Image: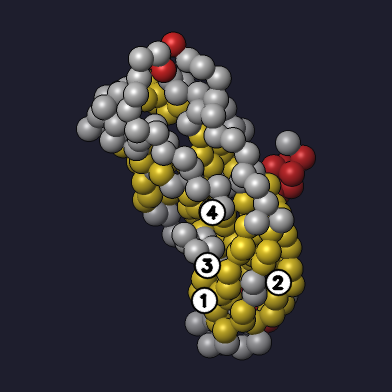
Amino acid sequence: MVLRAALAAALLVASGSPVQEARTAGGTIRGRVDVRRAAASSEGRPAVTDLGHHGPRDTPDRRRGVVYLEEAPLAAFEAPAAGRAVLDQRNEAFVPYVLAVTVGSTVDFPNSDRVYHNVFSLSKPKRFDLGRYPKGRSRSVRFDRPGVVRVFCEIHSHMNAFILVFAHRYFAATDAEGRYRIEGVPPGTYTLAVWNDGSVRARREVRVAAAGDVAEQDFTVE
């Protein structure tokens, strides 16, 4: 809970440096996050709905994470672009396991399984319960506060995922190989944080020297 609260606070912090407030095309921060620690089991408690069910069940990729600036330029907070994203329910798993969006974005929760699902969250930044709905249906939620939202299925206890909601655009989810890329970063020195599977796992200082500069920063998470 402490780590989660600290992350939520970090998503709101801005830097007051005049250099970092400059409205330029900015530079790029890119690299790779190598997650080597053992992932926790995704199996939940037995449920009545599991009895006699032999359908496919995917295992979430817990190596996926989000890399972001802990102190973003003040100009980034003026009008974060709201978007639209999808958190699918497929083979009794949320896909992707980690989703990162800006404040004001809407997330669609389609059901691609042959069974009913019931998506809900008790997280402080956004509490919701979408109720039960079948394959081919989709319901949506708008996320209007920054922070970490943990998502579950009321029917299938092993299903869970994370939605990270940012008040700025300087973040990137890692791909299947752990790579990330944050573009348009104004010149300045920042603290780059790596979030993985529930908490911040690493921090490192990174400097963007000038507009058009490419700063390389790799991480290893044990």
Measured Cα–Cα span from mark 4 to mark 2: 22 Å
- State the quadrant of the N terminus: top right
Secondary element at tag 1: strand
In the image, residue 203 sits, relative to residue 125, either above or below, namely: below
Tell whether label 2 touches label 4 (CB within 8 Å). no
**Residue 58: x %, y % from top left:** 41, 38
Measured Cα–Cα span from mark 4 to mark 1: 23 Å
Query: Which comes sooner in the sequence, label 4 or label 2?
Result: 4
Labels 2, 3: front one: 3
Measured Cα–Cα span from mark 4 to mark 3: 9 Å
Numbered label attached to residue 104: none
Q: Sort mark 2 into few (<14), some (14-19) or many (20+) by Cα contacts within 10 Å.
A: many
Q: Label 1: which residue? A: 184
Which residue occupies 51% across, 34% down?
160
Q: In the rendered view, does 214 fall on the left or right side of 193?
A: left
Tell whether label 2 touches label 1 (CB within 8 Å). no
Q: Type of residue at label 1? A: Gly
Labels 3, 1: front one: 3
Measured Cα–Cα span from mark 3 to mark 1: 17 Å
Q: Type of residue at label 4? A: Arg
Q: Label 4: which residue? A: 64
Numbered label attached to residue 179: 3
Q: Type of residue at label 3? A: Arg
Measured Cα–Cα span from mark 2 to mark 3: 19 Å
Query: Which comes sooner in the sequence, label 1 or label 2?
Result: 1
Numbered label attached to residue 190: 2
Labels 4, 1: front one: 4
Secondary element at tag 3: strand
Which residue occupies 74% across, 72% down?
205
